[in-house]
Amino acid sequence: MSPPDDHGLPPRKDQATVIGDAGPDSGDEWDEFEDEDAADDEFGHDSPAAAAEEGTAAPVRKRRRLRRKPPVERKKLSTMLEEIGADTTRERISVADLINAMDARAFGALLLIFAFPNALPAPPGTSGILGLPLLYLAAQMMLGRKPWLPKLIAARSMARSDFVGLVDRVNPWLHWADRFMAPRLQFLVTPRAEQALGAFVLILATVLVLPIPLGNMLPAFAICMIALGILESDGLWVSIGIAIGIGALIIAWAVVYALIRATIFLIVRAF
């Protein structure tokens, strides 16, 4: 215990020797004088209200409380697509409009838009048409540049009514995916990590463009998973996409190897 002061009273709390942690996380030591209007504290000193009645001045202790700002909620991709479709000032919606509307999230959104049709059964040649923009986007993502597409691709557009119909078909899948996504494993969605992901997506997009039997759907599905993970800062979905992509590359290589062996066998038997 500290020695009494000149008046024979124990020292004030701001003069006493502090034992242990007296910071804001020290429990009772910090909250003991929460009520500044109490008549007397445990050491016998007058509170500011009591001192005012006696005509004596007492220092008023002000405590500043720091409040953490609530995090800003990011718009979901489904919401952004609905807002673009609801813009009645546009008669047609182009790929360039999507790039401008998505801004910093354009890579993830465009990768998803161009990869998703290839993840579904589609007419032959679809992967070659939609795979070319994926090659452009993946290469720029790998180099850490902003998304850019040639004018021939960026100027492609569709009627707003058709776009709304497409959004109505895609959004149920996005709403379903939203229930399982949350910001986690964010070291997989940092700018440096996204450059590495761009290189991996470039490999997948190359396989997707090639006319390999059964070699298109799995790479496209892997790109969709990675794109959703980038959009929602969910490293778990990115890691699942990487695992699916590795499996897709193994299957594609096995198919190519089998085709080569079959071709060699037929040539040998023919001659």
Image (spheres, rainbow, N blue to C red):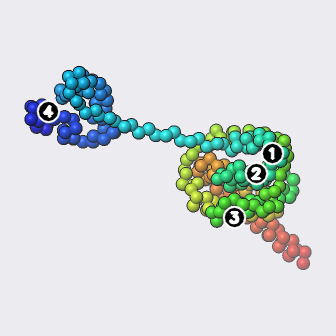
Task: State which quadrant residue 25 falls in.
Answer: top left
Q: How many marks?
A: 4
Relative to 174, is 154 above or below?
A: below
Residue 73 x %, y % = 59, 41
Q: Is residue 71 visible?
A: yes
Q: CA distance from mark 4 to mark 2?
A: 73 Å
Residue at 74% across, 38% down: 172
Mark 4 or 1, nearer chain start = 4
On residue 10, the disc is 4
Which residue is labeled 3 in the image? 139
Residue at 14% across, 37% down: 1
On residue 97, the disc is 2
In terms of depth relative to the viewer, which is nearer, 226 or 2? 2
Do labels 4 and 1 touch, CB within 8 Å?
Answer: no
Furthest toward the front, the residue is 55
Q: CA distance from mark 3 to mark 2?
A: 21 Å
Do labels 3 and 4 touch, CB within 8 Å?
Answer: no
Amino acid type at mark 2: Asp
Amino acid type at mark 1: Arg
